[in-house]
Amino acid sequence: MKPILAALIAATLLTMPPARAQNAPASAAQPPDFPGLGEIMTLQQLRHIKLWFAGRADNWPLADYEVGELREGFEDADKLVGGGTVDKMVGAPMMALQKTVGDKDRAAFLAAFDRLNAGCNSCHQLLGRPFIAIQRPTSLPYSDQSFTPQK
């Protein structure tokens, strides 16, 4: 079931036409090959899942990598939404997550992860997308990746 889910997500990403942010200001025009907000946020959701399982497994190098990838994705989303909106909602939680990962502090990581979720949900509310509600992942769609730290 999980490999099928991952394949469906990949197939969907490869076949969907680029979506454009409805809230993007005219000055935030992006090149035609720049991904739309939907594509960016779908990748963010996958990174969010990987970050959760990396932190839960104390795989701090992987968690650090995923925090960096999330940060880049949020920067791209902010370009489309404009006004620094995304950074205002998730900037502080992302900094807290980076610190907990650097400190290798699982308890603090769990709390910071929940604050990131709250920031994501606040942003979705602000942008008129309250039906997109982010939470802690409950299952791992990556059966082909080990989240156990490698020696």
Image: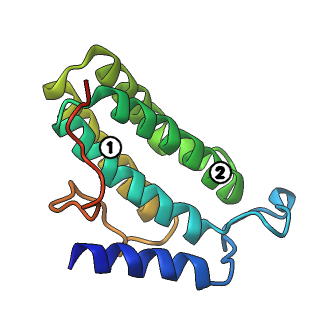
Image location (x, y in percent) of residue 71: 53, 39
In the depicted structure, whether residue 39 falls above or below residue 60 = below
Disc nearest the viewer among 1 and 2: 1
Give coordinates of residue 112: x percent, y percent: 27, 33
Kindly identify the residue that appears in the image at 30 percent across and 52 percent down. 145
Quarter holding the C terminus is top left
Instruction: Tell me the kind of residue under disc 1.
Output: Leu
- Give the labeled residue for mark 2: 76
Sequence order check, earlier mark of 1 and 2: 1
Left or right, residue 139 beside residue 89: left
Q: Is residue 81 left or right of residue 46?
A: right
Farthest residue, direction top: 103
Q: x, y percentage for residue 46?
A: 39, 59
Question: Left of 3 or right of it: where is 68?
Answer: right
Left of 112 or right of it: where is 124? right
Q: Position of residue 74 (x, y in %)?
A: 55, 47
Using the image, tell me which numbered label, if any, was put on residue 51.
1
**Residue 5 shows which numbered tag?**
none
